[in-house]
Amino acid sequence: MHIVPVIDLMHGQVVSAVRGERHAYRPVVSPLVAGSDPCDVARALLARCLPHRLLYVADLDAIQGNRPQHGALAALLAALPDVTLWLDAGFTGPTAAHALRNALGPDGSRVQPVYGSESLADATSLAADPEAILSLDCRRAQPMDRAGCWQQPACWPGTVIVMTLDRVGGRGGPDLATFERLRALAPGRRWIGAGGVRNAADLAAAAAAGADAWLVATALHEGTLV
């Protein structure tokens, strides 16, 4: 099963995401790298996931309704010329995603939009983006779902992330019950989990539940996956 490294960006720095409590996020402190510069942290995490060249980026400024962090995103793309970014920047739909990719210039072609259910305005709009990734977001067992995405599996694209925010950085194990329930509603997709993986045993359990990949940050920083 693939491990997809994750960085969460806030005010131009990588922050430690813990249980979705965004007001409490602080710059990351990691044994892998000095400081919280996005390019340095990304390189360190990717080095632990070779040969895969994929990085998940959450632009928390944009997700919370502020302007996307164009400078930090452009710097990441320039520093990582062989890497594709899965980017959640609070996209309300494909028009917003297309505008951001254009603003990033030629390197924007290496950005694959992630549409979070907490931000997406209309689930049916995903059909307009052949590269769409849908993140089904929840917290404390409650869907974060302004457009009713969770109730429209026919609209789900070919790649779906199950994002349990209160498991992120919480060292409590993955939410496999929610993952398996949603996966059963739409077989034939590529299913990605997010949140809670602590060690190799968790990864094995996620693979057994049908996960094709899992988004990971804390366990990579702490070196607990081996």
Image (tube, rainbow, N blue to C red):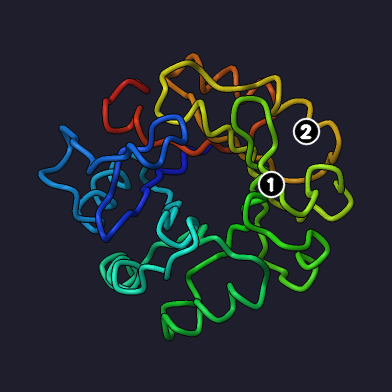
- Residue 153 in picture, x, y percent from top left: 85, 46
Q: Counting other residues with Cα less than 10 Å from the Cα at mark 2, is it few (<14), some (14-19), or many (20 or more)?
A: some
Above or below residue 87? Residue 28 is above
Left or right of 222 on screen, residue 96: right
Give whichever of 63, 163 is nearer the camera: 63
Q: Residue at x 23, y 45 (%)?
A: 44
| Contact, mark 2 vs mark 1 (Cβ under 8 Å) | yes
x then y, percent, for residue 4: 46, 43
Q: Identify the residue shown where x is 32% and y is 39%.
A: 25
Q: Is residue 129 above or below residue 9?
A: below
User: In the image as oriented, which residue stretches furthest toward the left?
Assistant: 34
Q: Between residue 141 and residue 85, name the one nearer to us.
A: 141
The front one of 120 and 64 is: 64
| Residue occupied by mark 1 | 160
Q: Earlier in the sequence, mark 2 or mark 1?
A: 1
Q: Quadrant of residue 141?
A: top right
Mark identifier at residue 21: none
Q: Residue at x 43, y 85 (%)?
A: 106
Amino acid tagged 1? Val
The amino acid type found where label 2 is placed reads Leu
Disc 2 on helix, strand or loop? helix
The quarter of the picture where the N terminus appears is top right
Q: Residue at x 66, y 42 (%)?
A: 144
Residue 182: assigned label = 2
Q: Residue 20, relative to residue 47: is it above or below?
A: above
How far from the left and from the top, in percent, is residue 53?
41, 55
Q: Secondary structure at mark 1?
A: strand
Classify 10 Å Cα crowding around label 1: few (below 14), some (14-19), many (20 and above): many
Classify residue 68 as left or right of residue 213. left
Quarter the C terminus occupies = top left
Residue 126 in which image quadrant: bottom right
